[in-house]
Image (cartoon, rainbow, N blue to C red):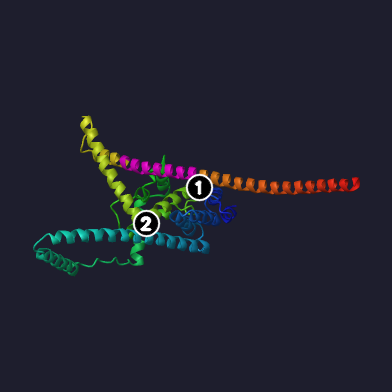
Amino acid sequence: KSAAHLAYGEKSKALHDARKCVEYSGGKWAKGHTRLAAAMMSLGRYGEAADAYSTVLNEVEPNNEVAKRGFEDCRKKEQQLREEKERELRKMQEVLDQQKKVEKEESNNQKDDNGGDEEDDLLDDFFSEVEKATEKPKPTKKSEPDEEATNRIKTQLNDLGTSQSQIDRLLQVNYEWKNLNPFYVLDIPHTIDDDSIISARYRALSLLVHPDKCLDDPVRAKTAFEQVRKAMNQMNDVDKRKHVRALIEEGMKQGKRAWKEECSNSSSVQLDNEEGMSQAQSKATMKIFAEIEQKRREIERRKRKFEQRERAQEDDEKKKETDERRFQKEWREGERVDKRVGNWRDFQVGDKKKRTS
């Protein structure tokens, strides 16, 4: 029904129906995601629409042409919005620059000698040219040979242990909250930023917990594998990776402060206990990720409520239009009946007059 709702301009209903399609299909039906993306685009939510199309291409059907075209359309729309915002900002900046220019001219007119300012401008230009000339180009990363990449994966496999131990780690109690940190899922320090190491870790962990490799426990292995793939999707996004690293750094700081405070309040706790500090930092980090996830869910809940109100408004407007059309139709039909009755009465009155005369 989602496409039909869109055709009739019922955008919120289309979005609701598309969400249900994705939910009932378990996220494995490509058309459900594309319908969801189309509804998002109609509401101007191009970023979320691009994510829906991306889900089709990355997880469901990589060669889906509708998803490819839709993803490109979303990016174009986002680019257009960014360009419009940039134009507005440039206009504002031009106004500000013009105001500054006028103020500067007024201040310069009050001075007897303006040579000092010109010399400063020349010096600024000179130093900027020197900085550009002495700036060193950033080194580019060279791709490693296939053999070295294979050795990296083997090393990671030896470090990770057995499949069962990794499945148990990834699916421990409250794993949905603990696995919000992708560095924790991949079991690597947050200071690592080498793509080759991260990729090798992901491949090794994926091999260990892949359902086809864990025939004794395929259901739990599938869930663990999905957790690993979700974490890697976050790591592939450079901006998200930076954001995650910043959150972990903040959690480390908060955990360290909490540990020092606990040590100062209790004589039985030693400040140099590294294990205790590490646990405090892990707890603080997990709390930060959990709070952000709670806020995200709250925002999602509010969106759903807003969409429900939009659907209710669309239903009310449609009902009013239907009632208005029904009223107009009934009124026109009633008017025709009245005219027919009136004409018949006039005819009878005229006929009686003829007879009496």
Question: Decide: marks 2, 1 in contact (CB < 8 A)?
Answer: no
Residue that appears at 33% across and 50% down? 244
Q: Is residue 7 visible?
A: yes
Judge the density around disc 2: few (<14), some (14-19), many (≥20) Cα neighbours within 10 Å. Answer: few
Question: Which residue is identified by label 1?
Answer: 219
Mark 1, residues whose alpha carbon is within 10 Å: few (<14), some, or many (≥20)? few
Identity, as a three-letter code, of the amino acid under mark 2: Asp
Q: Pick whichever, 97 or 146, lies toward us.
A: 97
Front residue of 348 and 318:
348
* Residue 104 percent coordinates (x, y): 18, 60
Residue 313 lies in quadrant: top right
In the rendered image, residue 180, in percent from the top left (x then y), is placed at: 38, 46
Residue type at mark 1 is Val
Q: Dot 2 corresponds to which residue?
A: 237
Q: Is residue 276 magenta?
A: no
351 left or right of 180 in image: right
In the image, which residues are magenta? 283-307
Which callout, 2 or 1, points at the residue further toward the start of the chain? 1
Residue 116 sits in quarter: bottom left
Q: Position of residue 223 (x, y in %)?
A: 47, 48
